[in-house]
Image: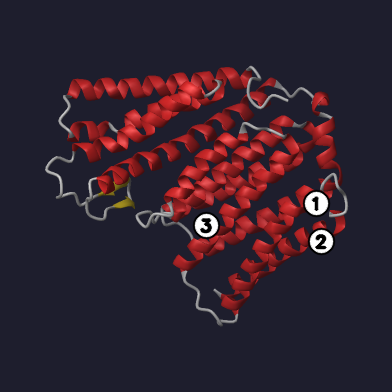
Amino acid sequence: MNWIFLINFAIALAIALLLGLNFFRYYKNRKIRETVNYLLFIGILYFFAAVFSFLWYLDILKYNSNDFLFLYALVILVQSVFLFMIIYSISNNKKMFYFLFFYAVILISFFFPVFNFFYLFIITSFLLTLLFFIDLSIESFHCRKTGYFGIFYSSLSLLFCMLLLFRIGDIFILSSISNLLFLGLIVGFSRELKYLHLECRKNKEKKRESPFFLVFLRYLVFILVITNFVFIATIVIHEFGHLAVSHFYGCGEGQIVYGKDIHTEILCSEIPDNSPVILGGFLLPFIIAVFLFIIGGRFIKDIALLIAGFDLIASNKDFFDIGLSGNIVMAALIAGVLCLIAGIFMLIKSRLGGQYFAP
């Protein structure tokens, strides 16, 4: 496998050198200084990744797949944040902060020792990146080449992560292919860097109309990605709700396990009735959904409906466990499905109507 380490070293080093070159070429240009600063940070990240690959190639450090999984998740996390900053500086789209908030909620959950499913975390990172690049391709005609290739890169990287979830393929090989795609993205972005920042801000009013089919397809993918992103965030918050209530009651150390499904294992002999712990999973996301629905604008209200819908569906087994009748559980399930349908419908209506991410 040594040749894979050497190839990944070359790819990561090429990314680092190219991003560093862009920084030294454009850092005196006040118009794009902010963008190249973010690119430099990503370049530094890949430089350290290249160093690790080279040390593994020389067998100075022993390669461990679990260690690499942790490092790769960390790299993708930082990369996602800086890509957000770059694309936000181009599109000036404040709605993207909502997705960053949900991403932060998932990220904070991983600081608890009960979480050990980095594959899911990497998938969430690439989902966030995919959202950003879809937004970029929609918002500006002049930025669409970068946006389209970013969509291609994020989508294939997501596919690789899904394969790894089913134990198909090797994480180092698939991540190296993903890095190669990212290198292609950086090469294309470097060619447009001189003009991209100015054109995206000055020419938004000159955006050309795309054929309806392409517009519909882009928005459909966008909404599907939003829905999946909210789904992951809701499940994480739901399981964290179980854990938070169990710690409040002084229960034994539990864990949130990712295997064939996500579930919470809690040792709770300190209280005779586990109902509060079981209901904690339902109540935390539901309270968040109600809070967002009350204080949020139209976009946040739609997201709140999705959270409530996923939470009601995810709590189906919990409702049985606390002794609710089958009729009540079925009513909650139907209510969850209706919330999902309403949320998705409102997203489609507003998205096609140009209500979101409007210039």
**Alpha carbon separation for disc pair 3 and 1:** 25 Å
Residue located at (36% from left, 31% from top): 311
Q: Where is residue 231 in the image (x, y as percent from the top left)?
A: 44, 36
Label pair 3/2, CB-CB below 8 angstroms: no
Q: Where is residue 155 in the image (x, y as percent from the top left)?
A: 58, 44
Dot 1 corresponds to which residue? Answer: 190
Which element type, helix, strand or loop, lies under badge 3? helix
Residue 288 visible in the displayed image: yes
Q: Is mark 2 on a helix, strand or loop?
A: helix
Pointers 2 and 1 in contact (CB under 8 A)? yes
Whole-number angstrom distance, CA of label 3 to CA of label 2: 26 Å
Between disc 2 and disc 1, whose residue precedes? 2
Res 289 → quadrant: top left
Image quarter (top left, top right, bottom left or bottom right) of the C terminus: top right
Say if 225 sits above or below 356 in the image: below
Say what amino acid the circle numbered 2 marks.
Leu
Quadrant in the picture for the N terminus: bottom right
Q: Quadrant of residue 347?
A: top right
Q: Is residue 16 above or below residue 191?
A: below
Q: Distance between the residues labelled 2 and 1?
A: 10 Å
Q: Does 149 sit left or right of 56 as displayed?
A: right
Left of 204 or right of it: where is 327? left
Q: Which residue lies furthest to the left in this view?
A: 272
